Amino acid sequence: MMPTGLTVHALAERFRRRELTPSEVTRAYLSRIEALDPQVKAYLTVTADQALRLAAEADARFQAGAPRGPLDGVPIALKDVLCTRGIRTTCGSKILEHFVPPYDATAVERLLAAGAVLLGKLNMDEFAMGSSTENSGFFPTRNPWDLTRVPGGSSGGSAAAVAADMAAVALGTDTGGSIRQPAAFCGDVGLKPTYGRVSRYGLVAFASSLDQIGPLAKDVEDAAIVLQTIAGHDALDSTSVDVPVPDYRAALKQGIEGLRIGIPAEYFIEGLDPEVEAAVRAAIQVLEKLGARSEPVSLPHTEYGLAAYYLIAPAEASSNLARYDGVKYGLRAPRARDLIEMYSRTRAAGFGAEVKRRIMLGTYALSAGYYDAYYGKAQRVRTLVRRDFQQAFERVDVIAAPTTPGVAFKFGEREDPIQMYLNDMFTIPVNLSGLPGVSIPAGFTMAGLPIGLQLIARAFDEATLLRVAHAYEETTAWHERKPGLEGKPR
Amino acid sequence: MTEYEIVIGLEVHAQLLTVSKMFCGCSTVFGGEPNTRTCPVCQGMPGSLPVINRRAVEFGIKTALALGCRVNVLNRFARKHYYYPDMPKNYQISQYEEPLAEHGSLEIEVDGALRAIGIQRVHLEEDVGKLIHEGNLETALSSQVDFNRAGVPLMEIVSKPDMRNSAEAAAYLRGLRAILVYLGVCDGNMEEGSLRCDANISLRPKGEQEFGTKVEIKNMNSFRNVQHALDYESRRQARTLEDGGRISQETRLWDPDRAQTVSMRSKEYAHDYRYFPEPDLPPLQLEPRWVDEIHATLPELPAARRHRFARQYELSPYDADLLAQGRGLADYFEEVVRVHPKPKVVANWVLNELLREVQGDDDKALAACPIPPRHLAGLLALIDDGTISGKIAKDVFEKMYRSGEEAQAIVAREGLRQVADTGAVAVVVDQVLSAHPKVVDDWKSGKKAAMGFLVGQVMKATGGRANPALVNSVLSEKLSRL
């Protein structure tokens, strides 16, 4: 197998046995990016020189017999919403097209400290607002399984890069499903950790109370390795929680005998793609064969989650994005006559339509006289959604459901924003509740498009989540299938 | 003509004397090259997050307890939104519905009458940066922004609308400042902006319960300006009402040069701040034990000290008040009294002589004073034992202040020892009497005022060193024998 097809743990093993060096693998990735990315368009920035330098440093550590751990020398890539010192960080937006942060995000710092080799920064929906990467301020990313279809979003670049073997693993962010949905669309493992598990310091905020960083990986063990590295309390993020980080890789091997799996009726509704439903139900049967017991659970407030989310997230976004005003960094529209004109021209030119839509929604929701009816009520709904999960988790250990109602759609197919928003109806309640969720490959449609199985666990119980995902993965081969891009014409 | 009652409430912003900023580790030291005391957090860089400064919270709690507030063990930060280039994030992290503390009061004394002014709330927030315009705001071709001050901790103390005239407002502000300085949480400097005051003022017919329309006044950077601005504004409002006009709710700026308030923005342009709970900071849960510990360490506060000074040292309320205003000055006074237990004399010297020289009455000013309390006590002892006269002592005091020397050394070197020898004084008296026969005649013919002139001549001839009591008795005796 080409080195770019290897998982992180397989790479680590080859490095250890001196069968491959980080430099060889990094060069292989860089040439694969050069060959394939013109079709996929996952990367916004490729940092080839720095990657080769970091790889050479990793080579030296292996030669000296002192590698740093399972990520040492492993080529990774980052969603362009994570700050990287000295490397531009655009958030997929024209307004930050030339913004170069003076610091690394905590998660990035931890990956680099573990020896990871940064290949570059990945495309995304502008400020992580979207489900298709069509909202990128620069260009859309294509789904490696079908270049006429979207890779999902907002971490579409991350999902596509991992699926197309243009990075061993990538970081994405998930505010309403932005890791899990593109992972499902591209056949990756996509993990959204518990809110507070991974520091948000250096993650450019979309909706602060919902955003969380997580890996998009080729398999569950890789996701566990990355989570192990980036998880844990950070003094720079007051919302990161100081609870012990268990050994995730050790947890993978424990099996799922006797585990109780909840099946929420509210996630199997009209409008769910029959092929997706069939694959998810088959996956649940696989889990039962492995010794888990399934039982129905009810999450009655699920249907209100989407509406609550589209008040809370835009409200926070309208506030978080206020700083992009042309004064300090990023775009400044020229020839403004006064301050107000500079503000409005800069923001008119710098932000795309979806970002503007959400800023307006959020501004309205927080306005005097509307706050209680919109933002206040949405917060009360959020509490109800969270309570649904709490009650369900009194009876079950994990909840299994589809990640998305359908599979990857064609470009331009979801022009109505509401239709686009509906894509995230199964992932949003997990963010509203702050819970960990993972999407893993669970089959393909007749047309050959990946289907995602979503697993949800109790807060800070990523170990159980990954354990179930791993047990499923061990008895299936979906994650091993590759999109076969090489044969496709450019 | 209707008689109006003035209703005043004050909002005071105090810069806290913490080492680092409210939400990051940057230095709070004033000045420095622009934007050198900044980091991603206080510059509002994408991806940066705030972390609460524990010391700022401690200072807030201290102040709240000193003002008798109820400290909310669960309180919360909120975002306050408006666009301005001096604000890095275009929102300010402040507190709104759940402030640090509420429901306190501050006792003030005006014309001998005591009144309690209610404190509505005490909350914490971050300061903004500073704009530097080329020329003035209206004509500047370009402006620059310095974020060194952005993120410096501010404490906002909001009074209830309990003050009824500008004197009460000034007394409240003085009292509050004294407490802040006593606690060491703020340096209290209004001119430099580390203590800022905005006022809300309205008028209502005497006896009316409903409040009138209020006007907010900003830009009063001294006690005097606060009082002048409120006097001006209450007259302006009274005149408007008497002329049958209506007060519009607005913000007005005090213009000290023209001595008037000027309209800045009316309510139609009032901001909708779109407050909502700061999602980057979990609610601030205070350990009740920590609050108790802070309570236990509160120093004796200005009001208590003022009362004790008046009682224990039998000082006038006025002197006690002045002495207790600043913790440094009050400590200094008590230090001197400990060595020289004549409180009234010490009070006079501290208030009249010392305060003429020392700039300010806080710890810092008094610590820099070249006359330590022990030296002042030494000087007063020299007056007491008759070594020097009170008049000479004032000259010695000035020399002590300039040189840092002790009184004893100056008196010895400059031969300022008082002439208390009857024989020596008698010789000078004889010379004066023979040099001024006409004055002596005047005295004989009953003009008793002539005595004063003769005493003055004797003092002059002795360079002020003669003991005045002795001069009087020798002179009286000699004149009566003439």
Image (cartoon, rainbow, N blue to C red):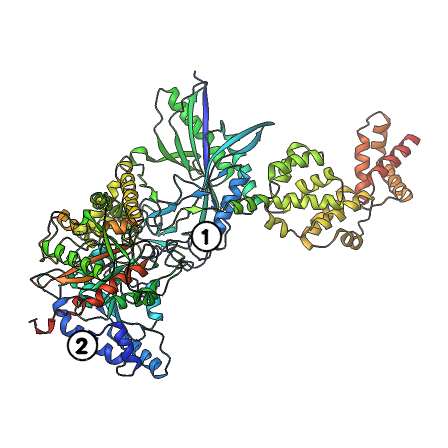
Please say whether residue B223 is visible from this viewpoint: yes
* Circle 1: residue type: Asn
Label disc, if present, on residue B470 of the rendered structure: none
Percent across and percent down for residue A109 are 35, 66
Question: Looking at the image, which is closer to me, B167 or A375?
Answer: A375
Q: Position of residue B45 (x, y in %)?
A: 33, 57
Determine whether, in the image, residue A438 is placed left or right of residue B207: left
* Residue at image coords 40%, 22%: B210
The residue at the point 60 percent across, 36 percent down is: B303
Question: Going by the image, does A31 lie left or right of B337?
Answer: left
Q: Mark 2 belongs to which amino acid?
A: Ser
Q: Which mark is residue A31?
A: 2
- Check the image and report above or below for B75 versus A4: above
Residue B134 appears at what percent x and percent y? 35, 52
Which residue is disc 1 drawn over? B53
Q: Which quarter of the rendering shows the N terminus of chain A?
A: bottom left
Residue at 74 percent of width and 53 percent of height = B406
Residue furthest to the right? B481
For residue A230, what is the image quadrant? bottom left
Question: Where's residue A76, x and y in %?
Answer: 26, 70
Marked residue chain, label 2: A
Q: Please state which of residues A220 and A474 is positioned toward the viewer in this rendering.
A: A474
- Quadrant in which the C terminus of chain A appears: bottom left
For residue A92, say whether it is visible: no
Q: Secondary structure under badge 2?
A: helix
**Residue at disc 1, secondary structure:** loop
Q: Chain of mark 1?
A: B
Q: Is residue B462 above or below residue B412?
A: above
Q: Residue furthest top?
A: B1
Using the image as rendered, state which of residue B477 and residue A365 is in the foreground: A365
Q: How many marks?
A: 2
